[in-house]
Image: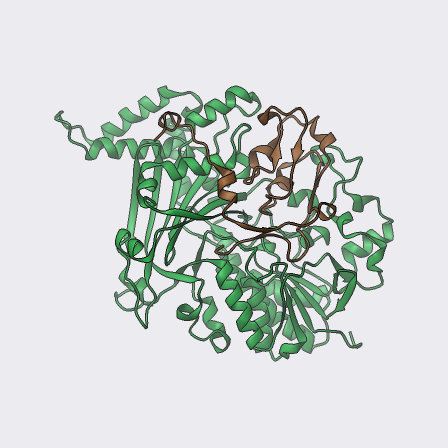
Amino acid sequence: MSETQKIGLFKYDVKNGLGLVGYNIDDHEFAHIIVDIKKCDECSHMMCVWGCPAQCYNFRDQGLEHMKFQYEDCVECGTCFILCDQGAVSWNHPRGGFGITYSHG
Amino acid sequence: MDEETDFDVIVIGAGFAGAATAFQLLKEGIEGDRILVVDRADPIGGKNMTGGILWGRELDAFKEYLGNWEMDCPGIERCINHKKVGFLNNEDALFIEGRFASWDGTGGTEEPSQRSAWSVLRAKTDAWMAEKMEEAGIFVMAGVKIDQLNIDGLEHTSYDARDLTDPSKDSGVGKAQKWKVDSLPRDVVDKIRNGTITGIVQGGEVMTCKVVVIAEGSNSILTRGYDFDTMLHAQSKDDMLLGIKEIIHLGKERIDERFNCFPGDDERPPSGMAMELALSLYREMSHEAWEKYPNTKGLYPRCGGFFYTNEETVSCGIIVQLKSLPEGLHTYDLYQAFKAQPAIAALIEGGEAIEYGSHLCPEYGLNRMPHRFTRDGAVVVGDAAGLVFANGMQIQGMNYAIHSGKLAGAAIGNCISRKDVSAKALDATYTKSLKASFIFRDLKRFKSATKFLNHPSNFTWVPELLGKTANRVFREIGEEKIPAEKVMLKTRKELRKINKANKKGMGFFGIMRLGLLTRKL
């Protein structure tokens, strides 16, 4: 157990976790989630960043000045749509056959 | 209604709810080639993620199509005869453990002695169910996502599918959020929200039917877009949980040994364990987060842990109440804390994570359901309708999904034979039978369970107090013994001192109130 874990702080290597899942990534023009990142500048809570289980949202927590969103790792859970109350997230499922494919579920 | 449609019924979503609807329709006498089931995953099941335990023998109703599903279905992993609930803090784990002979279906005196719970892996289960549907003659299409529903008298080209759920450019914040659909012409919006649904639209092509069944699951775009549930309502954090889990491969023998499982034979599937836990693991993490992001100071994440044994793997994960997530804490880091807790770490030792995934779980109860289950020519079933039961000791959704599918199938069969598929006719059959079923009676009876489940104490001092007290009561370190009650009072005092935010509800009346809530579980 590492020192940080001993005092009760934990970090999950989410990129490693996501590496275990299969994706069929659609082209940018068909991205299933579109984020109006201008609206994010005004956001005070960044709940999408904290809620997203796939680290698709990167913002001030990573030292970035503006929201950086990428849909490729999305696990299609819908959390960001629920947590965003700024009207910035346009959420839909990917086109049929695209996106994540679980082999166990 | 009289003109010929492409299909009688189109089911959107090939999960348990959708499959149950389709099978029930067959039983009602609808021809297989008049039923179309579409799913956005290819292969079917690939988008499905669950905890998950399938409770109850609802699938028995479809034996003629599924045969001995318990033994034959590759995703039905182990029969559960061993259930644990527990309390975890960072060091201590206290479990209540039950092993029940009658759950094996071979022994015990408790009637009925039957297997009624299985750990499931849905990607495999759903793929198998889809095969069985095809064998029964039902049309099944994989990799098809439905963008729009076809509405009588409205060209689907008169609005874009994304208009329904996209925020508009001039959207405000919070309750003032607006969606593009709001700025469409009035008569179009009216039709979208109240017109008669006559089919589906996919890739610009219309397929017509008499009834559309929306079985999209917990993250249903169509129920939002077509006003079964309003957008703001669908966006509410209340009673919405995010599940995060890893599938960890341990190997069959190791699981049999580690969890004392029956290895299975020709007649009986291997047995397994299901465990649900209240977690208080996040004090340090929360305090660190509050320092950086004081907006949500005092908010502890309310998380439950789950741990299920599959045949060769274990499902290990947490569910987070989205409402309780403070700023500064990543949901996946909350999972790591669970995985690293010594009692859990011991269970997965030597294992290798082979899949990571996440899914929403709508524990709506009665308060937050869609405001209607039917429209002219359409019904909603399963998770899409928020039919999930949770009271802290049980969490069930798949059996409700199957049962609601059955009710929908029976109702639709009836309505089609009477040539009336209006909302009124569907309400009189489907909604009525749903409300009279055990699903609604359960949800009603356990209405106050939500209050208990959302109670912060269960995720802060309760697991700590129970764990620490048990630790001290069971231990021998060469000091004089103290009665358990005194140990608990002393521990309580210490915990109150550790931090003030954690103190809430620890007073005499707080504990009484919490105790009273447990009476309704």
**Please, is residue B329 above or below residue B423 in the view?**
above
Which of the image's four quarters has the N terminus of chain B?
bottom right
| Relative side of B521 to B437, left or right | left
| Relative side of B2 to B234, left or right | right
Residue B56: quadrant of the picture: bottom left
| Relative side of B199 to B360, left or right | right
List x then y, in percent, for residue B217: 59, 55
Q: Residue at x 73, y 31 (%)?
A: A39
List x then y, in percent, for residue B30: 63, 78
Q: Is residue A91 visible?
A: no
Chain in brown, by letter, is: A
Chain in green, by letter, is: B
**Please, is residue B29 above or below residue B15 in the view?**
below
List x then y, in percent, for residue A101: 56, 54
Q: Residue at x 31, y 38 (%)?
A: B93
Q: Residue at x 65, y 25 (%)?
A: A44
Q: Is residue B485 visible?
A: yes
List x then y, in percent, for residue B481: 15, 28
